[in-house]
Amino acid sequence: MKTHWSVLSVLVLVLIAVSTIARAEDRPPSGFPGNEAEPLGEFLAGTRWYWEGSKSHILEFEKDGKVDLDYWKYPTDWKVSGHNEVIFTMHLPTGDLNATATFTEDRSSFSGTQFRGGIIARSPRAPVEKFTPLAEFLPGTKWFWEGSKQHILEFQGGGRLHLDYWKLPTDWKVTGPNQVTFTMHFKTGTLNATINFDDDRSSFSGTQFRGGTISKSPRAS
């Protein structure tokens, strides 16, 4: 009888182990972002990537299946061809050429094979905020003025600025891709200050109203 129960116990344990393994295989590996389950074609449409790591060359997967990269002069399409794989097809007058990009499991970058057989170096995704027009990105944001948590500069709607110890009306206006000019209104005239944001828009620095330096001012919210 004891032998009979021992055999049954072993069988039950085996069944439990098999069931656990099956359930584990059905789950995505830990660490996957929530959008991993999203079909690759839906995930990619509208996204932008630093081509081979260069912030000067941005590759965009357009929603209509086209690819935009500044120095590709021929029409190029993209199409999902595997679990984490995309094929680029460049349409030359003499025929088509294909390149292949393979994404990492977390879809944070891709690498692959060039149209003529070379290597596509690691190409990470560009921050989404970088491509929101600066004038749309800034309203409502707050920044630690010159790194001080006691002095918060706020870009308000309507082009106004708020900083606790600025007592005169001050406006802001985008004057370049990553540049903003502040204009402070005195009774006798105006003074301008200029700030420049870093590439990921996590902070800015610049030139004060009377020529001094605005030191690094990171984003607060």
Image (spheres, grey):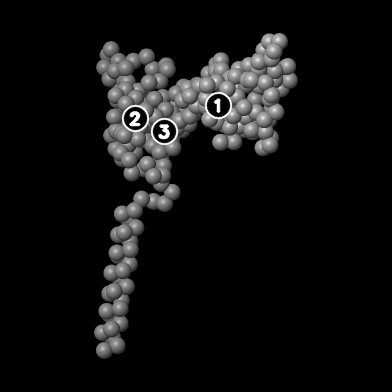
Residue 207 can be seen, yes or no:
no
Estimate the spatial distance between the alpha carbons at disc 3 and disc 2, rounded to whole Å: 18 Å
Q: Residues within 10 Å of mark 1 (few under 14, many from 20)?
A: some
Q: Are marks 1 and 2 in contact (CB under 8 Å)?
A: no
Estimate the spatial distance between the alpha carbons at disc 3 and disc 1, rounded to whole Å: 41 Å
Amino acid carrying mark 1 in the image: Gln
**Tag 3 secondary structure:** strand
Q: Is residue 119 shown above or below 173?
A: below
Compare residues 157 and 220 and report the one nearer the observer.
157
In the image, residue 122 lies at what x, y percent? 46, 33
The circle on residue 156 is 1
Sequence order check, earlier mark of 1 and 2: 2
- In the displayed image of the protein, which residue is found farthest to the bottom? 1
Q: Are marks 3 and 1 in contact (CB under 8 Å)?
A: no
Which image quarter is the N terminus in? bottom left
Report the residue at 57% width, 26% height from top: 155
Amino acid carrying mark 2 in the image: Ala
Circle 3 is placed at which residue position?
A: 111
Sequence order check, earlier mark of 3 and 2: 2
**Tag 1 secondary structure:** loop
Which image quarter is the C terminus in? top right
Circle 2 is placed at which residue position?
A: 45
